[in-house]
Image: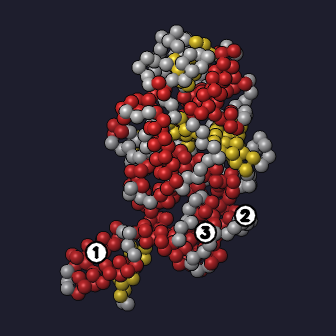
Amino acid sequence: MSLNVYNTLSRSVEPFHPLEAGHVRMYVCGMTIYDLCHVGHARMMMAFDIVYRWLRASGYRVTYVRTITDIDDKIIRRALERGVSIRALTDEMIAAMREDISRLGIEVPTHEPRATEYVPQMLDLIARLEQRGLAYRASNGDVNYAVRRFAGYGKLSGKSLDELRAGERVAVADAKEDPLDFVLWKGAKPDEPEDAKYPGPFGVGRPGWHIECSAMSCALLGEPFDIHGGGMDLQFPHHENEIAQSEGASGRPFVRYWLHNGFLNVDDEKMSKSLGNFFTIRDVLGRYDGETVRFFMLRTHYRSPFNFSDANLDDARSALRRLYGALETVPAQAMAVIDWTHAAAARFRAAMDDDFNTPGAVAVLFELAAEVHRSRSPEAAAWLRTLAGVLGLLQQEARAFLQAGTGLSEQQVAERIAARVQAKQARDYALADSIRAELAAQGIELKDGPQGTTWVRA
């Protein structure tokens, strides 16, 4: 079975074939880096971390570009609020982002360019658009893209220009010829800090958000390239505008396959600061370990809506402990080479080749864990660790993970069980019950029997 992916552009599942045999070029829109990254960002980066990992596991060489937007209105405002330079703010936030996502096991891309490093390429792209009659200089100093002059506009979102215009909610700037036109170059304003201003043939200013991605992707990957990814919320207008810019400037196709991850909700509601359900990655990592958060996210298909809640995280933590429990029973090292003809490996591969179906792949891991518990097979344990490693899971020492996950060592558990025995002997059943509840909250399940009390990690 070959890899099949859902292509937003065609709105169908298609066989994946890279432009260059054996080499995949992939671009993902990264963070606008003015604050700590939130769980929605984590969901997006996790989705394409899995795409990256599976392409390599499938034998491809992958050039993966994930960008950083380090000049933007929000960045400028935040830097002014804090009384720091734009560079100081973005350096701080980039370091925080890298620290947070590394704890989730998200791998470093091949290239992680900052937008401010590619301003010359952006200016060149804008000049080509102006030459082709697709860009115009506005009276307020901006340079705008003339959407109605590009025949293919709307093909990614599947909407006509009239439908898009009907949905337009942004107030139209007087300098725009059409409400759908978007800015390529923003003319500098007198009250803006000097480090937000860049010289260029269109006057002093800074690039618009959309042009940044077109310039960086084409500079690092060429045109066309294989995969462009991002959150579903970027499909329109951001990705639609990237197509218009890139294909308008070159006259060639921009991207072969468009992949979009689904929306994230918190307790079945859209995440929003106004609703009080907004969480940064760092907030979540203060309560749950990074591998649990990773496993939690991989239990949902990347294109499906994702519901973030403490109850679902707790369930994921218990499920991950069950997998590690199998490896505690029969320790095993990961295999150096995967034989994809092996029955479990073949089922795992079939799931992943079905548009990166991580829930199906995780189901194979539970099948292997059940076999380990049933047969105590070292081979099954090795397959469990090996296939889980493809997803960035189960690579810690099992006992260390389980003890860290509960916060209790085996000696501490034994001490609490002894205290419970003493409480029962003293007929203090309320205390005995509270100790059982305390241990259950730490993932320790007690089993009373004729030979005394035993325990397992839930």
How busy is the neighbourhood of tag 1: few (under 14 within 10 Å), some, or many (20 plus)?
some
Instruction: Look at the image and tell me in which quarter the C terminus lies.
Output: bottom left
Instruction: Pick whichever of labels 3 and 2 is earlier in the sequence.
Output: 2
How busy is the neighbourhood of tag 3: few (under 14 within 10 Å), some, or many (20 plus)?
many
Question: What residue occupies the far bottom of the structure in this picture?
Answer: 451
**Residue beneath label 3, please?**
384
Please say if the residues under marks 2 and 1 sit with CB atoms less than 8 Å apart.
no
Question: Which residue lies at the image location 39% right of the left edge and 46% below the top edge?
Answer: 279
Question: What residue occupies the far top of the structure in this picture?
Answer: 139
Label disc, if present, on residue 435 of the rendered structure: 1
Q: Is residue 15 above or below residue 163?
A: below
Residue 211 at what x, y percent from top left? Answer: 60, 27
Compare residues 354 and 21 and report the one nearer the observer: 21
Compare residues 411 and 235 and report the one nearer the observer: 411
Question: What residue occupies the far right of the structure in this picture?
Answer: 21
Instruction: Pick whichever of labels 2 and 1 is earlier in the sequence.
Output: 2
Instruction: Look at the image and tell me in which quarter the N terminus lies.
Output: bottom right
Instruction: Pick whichever of labels 1 and 3 is earlier in the sequence.
Output: 3
**Residue beneath label 2, please?**
340
Q: Is residue 91 above or below residue 150?
A: below
